[in-house]
Image (cartoon, coloured by chain):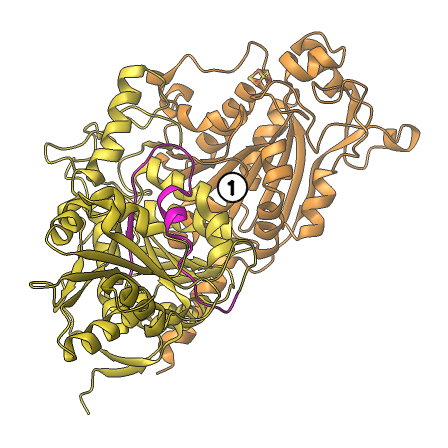
Amino acid sequence: MKKNLLFVQGNEACVEAALYAGLEFFAGYPITPSTEIAELLSYRLPKKGGKFIQMEDEISSMCAIIGASLTGKKVMTATSGPGFSLKQEAIGFAVMTETPCVIVNVQRGGPSTGLPTSVSQGDIMQARWGTHGEHAIITLTASNNQDVFAMTVEAFNLSETFRSPVILLFDEVVAHTRERLIMPEPGEISVVKRLRTSVKEGTDYHPYLPREDGRLPMSDFGGVHRYNVTGLMHDMWGFPSDNPKIVYGLMHHLVDKIEGHTKEITRIKEFFIEDAEYLLISYGSSARTALHVVENRRARGEKVGLLEIQTLWPFPADTVRKRCASVNCVIVVEMNMGQILHEVKKAVDDPDKVFLANQINGSFITPTDILNILRIIQGKGS
Amino acid sequence: MPVRDYIRERFFPHIWCPGCGHGTVMGSMIRAIENLGIKKSDIVVVSGIGCSSRICGYLDFHTLHTIHGRALAFATGVKLSRPELTLIAPMGDGDAFAIGGNHLIHAARRNIDITAIIMNNSIYGMTGGQYSPLTGYGDFATTAPYGNIDRSFDVVKLAMGAGASFVARTTTYHVRSMIKILEKAITHKGFSVVDILSQCPTYFGRKNKLESAVDMLKYYKTHTIPIGSKEKEKNPDLIERGIFVQEKYPEYCAEYDKIIEKASKER
Ligand code: SF4
């Protein structure tokens, strides 16, 4: 057996990837179905000199990782539905202060306590708009262990590159499915380091003055540059300001730095789409079922393809529009009442050809759930 | 270094009202740090939301002005990842004991080396004078027009009960002892809570017939006594000030270093 072949849960794949990406600090609070991430990191992090802390609640876990990130560490927290709701205000603080951090939300059935041990994809919109106020955010997802690994490393990389919180939106099936994971060798996947300022001690450092390329080099708390970080609108010094010109500029910077780089941030997988007449669009564990259906239909000669979206936010509207242009019908496969369906309808030229195949009862979506819709569309059903 | 070397003059004038006690707390904090000779780049000040929390912007340290009630949670992240830094968390009484009460008791329980400074004016100043968990029974506030029926916390007892290893109380009238207490709190290895009675003439004063900052300072002078004073027996309503607890308990970051040692030895 290859020495770097593991047989693990999705949550473990996430932990392996976070450590691969250089995670140094984790704060969390117990919640199903993400708890294994905290448990494993409490064991693994101190072995490499990193820090793990179980905080008094979900809110403080989010706050603690932001504090640690400002000292120059790579940080992460992990939670699930209700905990994700509690973290939202502090996620907004990370957006406003442009503090890199990674937030794992292993989705479970909601609203409220909902179905704590069942699968759901009901937090797509909460990931996008959970914190108050206009803002942009990056959200990634994955359907299998290998991709959980890749997307977790990606999450750390994007959060450093764009100085933004990045949400990893997994679900109960992905988190708890045990399957193989081939551990990449060190260096096999590139890891983005924190961009630090080259401004010398004694020279003015402007923490919130973007460089020409739009990036903002950081200076570690505890280092030579002392500056202010605030959740208020602020000027280039990080000092509170309500000057309309400054507010306008900051709002645009916060949104444009992400929305303006949608192409760069987009991760998408395509299966049999070149000649597809029917296109399934899916993500997370639902994409496993969708892929099964596609392979099955192809074996019968039907021209069905799959677009698996891994970057949910910013939504890759351009890519989706292009891929949907030449197909007869689009079926969005997800475990909610159509949260990505609406994004797809907005993106395509002809929204009337977009349909939904979903499951919302806490059970995992089955091929039959998709086939039933496909048959009706193909005119084979009633 | 002169006091002005510790402030960011660029950002003055400050937002505090004339007569507000918070400036006195800031001045004393700076003097304590100056006396201790701690390097400015070794100090991180973390605050929440409120009049008091605006202190961050004015101080020339690493400053983190966070969200309401959560200063200690952010400070815990900073301290645990860089234990060699000196962490100070100035908070208002609403910030620290209402919305942030949970973080305060848990930081105390962990005994993480952070100095929590409660700029206690018994009112929510920033939002215009609502009652806080430190507003006394019968006091008036914009949300207690008939008088407050909530019982207030005793900061000292609460901090002691939660396990803080250093607990003290002082007032903006007693500036010299405030500086001494802050010096001890900042150098104390563990979680320190310093309750500083700090006047808000604009809201608490106006609502409670303490017409001016001077009246409020006089009140602190006449209504507080050093710990153990005989006066207390005659008048139990007098508020004690001084150092109530100064104990050596295991400190959280030092304990975590032991975990790292243990974990790295294990294969
Ligand atoms: S409202 Fe009260 S606490 Fe706030 S600045 Fe004015 S006097 Fe100080």
Crowding at dot 1, Cα within 10 Å, few <14 / some 14-19 / many 20+, comes out as many
**Magenta-colored span:** A116-141
- Predominant SS of the magenta segment: loop
Secondary-structure class at tag 1: loop
Residue A49 drawn at (x, y percent): 34, 66
Q: Residue at x 23, y 41 (%)?
A: A218
Residue A30 drawn at (x, y percent): 52, 64
Q: Which chain carries label 1?
A: B
Residue A174 drawn at (x, y percent): 35, 70
A35 or B118, which is in the foreground?
A35
* Residue B24 is a magenta residue: no
Residue that protrudes farthest toward the right in the picture: B234
> What residue sits right under mark 1 in the picture?
B70
Quadrant holding the N terminus of chain B: top left
Q: Is there any visible trace of residue A228 in the rendered image? A: yes
Ligand 1 sits in quadrant: top right
Q: Is residue A166 left or right of residue B209?
A: left
Q: Is there any visible trace of residue A19 in the rendered image? A: no
Q: Which chain is orange?
A: B
Question: Is residue B228 depicted above or below A298 in this figure?
Answer: above
Q: In this view, does B69 lie to the left or right of B66?
A: right
Quarter occupied by residue A10: bottom left
Q: In this view, does A153 lie to the left or right of A93?
A: left
Q: Residue at x 35, y 45 (%)?
A: A128
Residue that protrudes farthest toward the left in the picture: A274
Q: The yellow chain is which one?
A: A
